[in-house]
Amino acid sequence: MRQTAYNLTMALAFAVIASACGGFDNTPFRTGVIRGRLTEADPSVALVSLVGNPDVRSTVAGDGTFVLEGVPAGPVELFIVASANKAVRLPVMVPGGGSARLQDVMPRAAGFLNLHVRAPARQSVEDGQVSLMGTPFQQLQLQDDGTLRVGPLPEGCYTVEASVTGFPVKKTEACVKESESKEVRIQLPGGGDDDCSISGCEQGERCSTEGRCAECTLDEHCAPGLTCRDERCQVPAAP
């Protein structure tokens, strides 16, 4: 009995020393696994990833089940696309070296961002791309006219990054609600002679102090009853 107790004590002491000296490999405890099932899903479209870390992702089986591996331990948020019009974001606590098993996840009505990317002096943006930072929607090709519909998206706020050859990258914050189809206009910043103070803007627009073509810069540029906010004429916010 004394020998058994002695062996156990020595084993514990060795483990403590190995950990203190960096000899204990705790890599398996830095990540975990998330298992769940979507109540409805289209496997040809559905995917599960992490907000802010879209490279950690999983497909969804025909019965709606998914297994997301290599998830950093701790609090994370899932970015789930279930079908062409359903999506959801879901906070999850992941145990290091363990598995988080979710109750059935019910996708919700998705939102869409209708992007309109424009360059100074009406220059071409046909080679342009946009990305929603921290999501699987990366390096999406713009239409020749600078438009693109992005989604389905879970309700939330996103950073839209527009990149067109010859222009500085432009980042814009956009929030979308469930079932919302939101228009987002992105004016690429000019460089040098591309500034709108030189190249001019389309009829009815104003050139802002930052060299962007805007719908308005002052309240008097708007119709009666509207105010100029974020360079757009809008209904005054409720007090």
Image: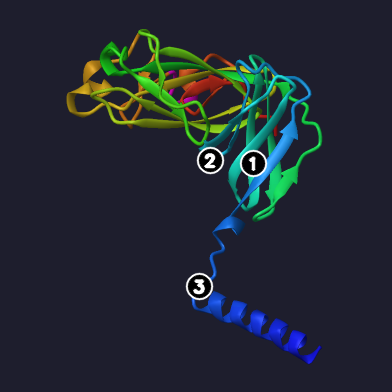
Q: Which residue is mark 1?
A: 77
Dot placed on the residue nearer the N-terminal end, 1 or 2: 2
Residue found 18% across the figure and 24% down from its top? 193
Question: Measured along the vertical axis of the image, is residue 34 above or below residue 95?
Answer: above
Residue 183 location (% of width, % of height): 54, 16
Range drawn in magenta: 215-219
Q: Secondary structure at mark 2?
A: loop
Q: Give the image quarter of residue 92.
A: top right
Residue found 63% across the figure and 46% down from its top? 76
Q: Residues within 10 Å of mark 2 (few under 14, many from 20)?
A: some
Q: Which residue is mark 2?
A: 52
Amino acid at circle 1:
Glu
Q: Nearer the viewer, residue 229 or 118?
A: 118
Q: Residues within 10 Å of mark 3 (few under 14, many from 20)?
A: few
CA separation in Å, label 3 and label 2: 32 Å
Q: Nearer the viewer, residue 50 or 58?
A: 58
Amino acid at circle 2:
Gly
Question: Measured along the vertical axis of the image, is residue 16 above or below residue 84?
Answer: below
Judge whether residue 217 can be spotted in this image: no
User: Majority secondary structure of the magenta segment?
Assistant: loop
User: Where residue 33 is drawn, which disc sits there?
Assistant: none
| Dot 1 and dot 2 residues touching (CB under 8 Å) | yes
Q: Which residue is mark 3?
A: 23
Q: Is residue 177 magenta?
A: no
Residue 117 location (% of width, % of height): 40, 18
Q: Residues within 10 Å of mark 1 (few under 14, many from 20)?
A: some
Q: Is residue 218 magenta?
A: yes
Amino acid at circle 3:
Gly
